[in-house]
C-alpha cells in the first residue's frame, strides 16, 4: 500500500519508533489508480491534495509553447507530490504517469497533522526535500556541462541508487520503464542520439539492456567515465543527523 511505500522511504532517513510508524500507517487518504502515459497533473491546475506513490513511475515536466518538453525529474514509489499544495493551490508543472500508477491522495490538513505530531518525522521529510533539491542541482550540471555519454551514464546510475533506497531492483540493475524519448527529454538530447549512446555503452561492455532491464556490467568504470559520485545523495549525513535527534 502507498503508506507502506512512504514509510519505507522515510525509514531510510530515520529510525522511527512504533508510535511514529503507526502515525504514518494511520494516514487517511483515498487510493487512486492511473493508466500509463496519462497526465495526472496539468500545469496551472488547482491542486487540492498531496499524492504519495504506492507503485509505478511518473515524471514531472514542463512544456514550451512550441511543444518542446523538459522532464524535470523521475518519481518513484514512496515519493510525494505535490507538497506545494501546502502553500499554493496551483501546479506550476505537469506530472505524467510512465507506468500504471497507484497513489494515495491525502488532504493537505491531514498531511499537516502528520507533520505536527512528530518533530523527528518532520525532519525526515525535510531531509527528503533537501535530497530532491540535490537531485535537481545534479540535473542542471548534468545537462549543462556533460557530454551525452556522461549524461546518460550518470542518469542511469542515479536511478539505480534511488531504486536501491526503496529496496527494488538488484545490486547490478533495475527494471527500466522509461522510453528513449523520455530519457532524451530528461537529458536535453534527441531520441536518436540517446539510442546511439545506449548502443555504444553496450558495445563498450558497460551495461546491457535485457527484457526491459538495465544491467550494469561495469558500474565502477561507468561511474568513473561520467563522474558519478553518490555523495550528493547525502545518505550518511541524513542518518547521522537524524540519529542525534
Image (cartoon, rainbow, N blue to C red):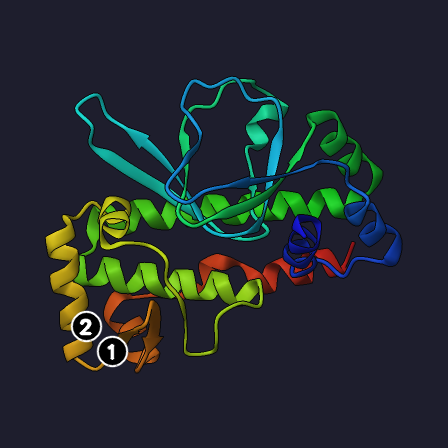
Q: Residue 179 lies in what quarter of the image?
A: bottom left
Classify 64 as above or below 79.
above
Q: Are marks 1 and 2 in contact (CB under 8 Å)?
A: yes
When the figure is inspected, residue 90 is found, relative to residue 209, above or below; the finding is: above
Which residue corresponds to the image point at 20% horizontal and 45% vertical from the top-left?
188
> How busy is the neighbourhood of tag 1: few (under 14 within 10 Å), some, or many (20 plus)?
some
In front here: 233 or 75?
75
User: Against 92, is 141 above or below?
Assistant: below
Q: Residue at x 75, y 37 (%)?
A: 115
First-in-chain label (1 vs 2): 2
| Separation of residues labelled 1 and 2 (CA atoms) | 5 Å
Query: Can you give x and y, in whole percent of width and height, for residue 100 in the image?
Result: 47, 48
Disc sitting over residue 206 in the figure:
1
Label 1 element class: loop
Q: Looking at the image, which residue is at 43% across and 24% down?
A: 92
Q: Name the residue under label 2.
A: 201
Amino acid at each position: 500500500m502507498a503508506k507502506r511505500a512512504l514509510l519505507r522511504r522515510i525509514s531510510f532517513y530515520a529510525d522511527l519508533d512504533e508510535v511514529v510508524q503507526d502515525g504514518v500507517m494511520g494516514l487517511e487518504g483515498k487510493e487512486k489508480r492511473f493508466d500509463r502515459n496519462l497526465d495526472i497533473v496539468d500545469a496551472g491546475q488547482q491542486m487540492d491534495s498531496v499524492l504519495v506513490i504506492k507503485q509505478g513511475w511518473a515524471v514531472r515536466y514542463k512544456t514550451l509553447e512550441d511543444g518542446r518538453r523538459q522532464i524535470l525529474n523521475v518519481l518513484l514509489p514512496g515519493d510525494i507530490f505535490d507538497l506545494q499544495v501546502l502553500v499554493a493551490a496551483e501546479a506550476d508543472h505537469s506530472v505524467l504517469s510512465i507506468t500504471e500508477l497507484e497513489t494515495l491522495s491525502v488532504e493537505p490538513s491531514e498531511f499537516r497533522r502528520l507533520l505536527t505530531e512528530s518533530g523527528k518525522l518532520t525532519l525526515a521529510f525535510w531531509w527528503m526535500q533537501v535530497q530532491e533539491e540535490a537531485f535537481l542541482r545534479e540535473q542542471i550540471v548534468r545537462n549543462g556541462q556533460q557530454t551525452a555519454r556522461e549524461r546518460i551514464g550518470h542518469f542511469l546510475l542515479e536511478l539505480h541508487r534511488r531504486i536501491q533506497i526503496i529496496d527494488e531492483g538488484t545490486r547490478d540493475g533495475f527494471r527500466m520503464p522509461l522510453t528513449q524519448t523520455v530519457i532524451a527529454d530528461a537529458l536535453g538530447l534527441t531520441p536518436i542520439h540517446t539510442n546511439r549512446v545506449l548502443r555504444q555503452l553496450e558495445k563498450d561492455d558497460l551495461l546491457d539492456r535485457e527484457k526491459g532491464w538495465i544491467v550494469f556490467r561495469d558500474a565502477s568504470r561507468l561511474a568513473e567515465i561520467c563522474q558519478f559520485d553518490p555523495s550528493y545523495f547525502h545518505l550518511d549525513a541524513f542518518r547521522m543527523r537524524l540519529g542525534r535527534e
